[in-house]
Amino acid sequence: MSVEEWLRVPTVKAERAARTRQRILLAAAEVFDEAGYERAAVTQIVERAGLTLGALYFHFGSKQGLAEALMNAQPATIEPHLESTGLQRVVDITLVWADRMKRDPILRAGVRLAVEQGSHGMNDATSFEEWRALMRSHLDVARAGGELRASVSPDRVARFVVGACTGMQVYAHLATKRADLMERVSDMWELLLPGVAADSMLHDIQIDPERIPDTGP
Amino acid sequence: MSVEEWLRVPTVKAERAARTRQRILLAAAEVFDEAGYERAAVTQIVERAGLTLGALYFHFGSKQGLAEALMNAQPATIEPHLESTGLQRVVDITLVWADRMKRDPILRAGVRLAVEQGSHGMNDATSFEEWRALMRSHLDVARAGGELRASVSPDRVARFVVGACTGMQVYAHLATKRADLMERVSDMWELLLPGVAADSMLHDIQIDPERIPDTGP
């Protein structure tokens, strides 16, 4: 082994570990998404991933650790698809989220586990607080740019939007298998913008689902 | 038995049956609220109610039938506490709902079961659609009374508010054990009213939690 090859060993190992972790995460997402937490078996997850139980426990510690990792992976599935800033960014986060819910099992499992966690004895608001902090950061930019009504608190808007999206998803999932989730999100902004955006911004913010490009598979 | 007594037999029986049904419902609500659907045992429910398994199956058919009855009992726990009309009524439904969530186990169990139902293989949007229809009926009154902005669809507002309340409750439950649920509901209306209420109504609609009288135990 040359010095160069020897120096690369940790990187190669880390890359392989990251790929293994991602394979388990994806297989777990599919199984949780189909069966829910209680009915999902870890043996089924590793079988689908083509890996061993040892790999699962090495990377996630337990079935619950896997569920926590999925709940907290939500924002990472959305952010790469976005370019806008300020209030438009917050709108876009929700539109891309509604679009990605149709095709991304990791996002879908994360949302489902976060909502249903009470039924399997978990009680972890982390994923909600992370969404809120993310939206809050973009709303702070909006505030600095004069995009918000003076009376509006960026943190309270963030808290409200996270809660509203959570519930719209639950309702849309039961009523229409999420077929109208995007429409519901767009509706939310139509109702919400007059109370949130500065008058000068009201007609600049785009809330039409069509503005979201095809985010791929 | 006199004729009068004989004629009263069906009424007495019906009253007794209604009381039995209500006792089972309350015991089931407490158990579901504490343990979630999967972990709740029907034996535990009838023991708490001081009744037999036979009574439970006679009135509700199955554990799932009991869960459905609780999910669909939600509006009935709220409506008796209300007097306002139109848009104010819709605001009041949500404020009283947030208040009753603190003290009414039947409401709490209904909400929890509706949100977590996916985890135990149920898929029933009925309770959401009933809330929506109820709010829609009051928003139709609001529309007829000129209380809504011309661009607003009563049905879409109803659909949005039901979803938003659902999600605010999930988030508040995890983050603060619902301590700030009322504040979140009031926040929602502060953000939402400019997009929903006609300008002439904007300052007439009361959204302060203080307006809700003590609704008792």
Image (cartoon, coloured by chain):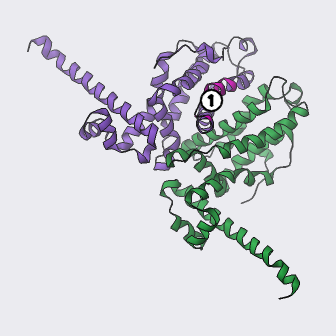
Chain colours: A green, B purple
Residue A131 coordinates in the image, percent (x, y): 72, 44
Judging depth in this view, the residue of A147 and A205 nearest the camera is A147
Establish if B65 lies above or below A78.
above
Residue beneath disc 1? B161
Dot 1 amino acid type: Val
Q: Residue furthest right?
A: A145
- Image quarter where the C terminus of chain A lies is bottom right
Quadrant in the picture for residue B63: top left
Judge left or right: residue B124 versus residue B44: right
Residue B138 coordinates in the image, percent (x, y): 57, 19
Establish if B2 lies above or below A144.
above
Asked whether the viewer can see residue A79, the reply is yes
Judge left or right: residue A166 versus residue A82: left
Residue B155 coordinates in the image, percent (x, y): 61, 28
- What span is in magenta? B176-187
Does the magenta stretch mainly form a helix, a strand or a loop? Answer: helix
- Mark 1 is surrounded, within 10 Å at the Cα level, by few (under 14), some (14 to 19) or many (20 or more) other residues, namely many
- Residue depicted at x 68% and y 51%: A72
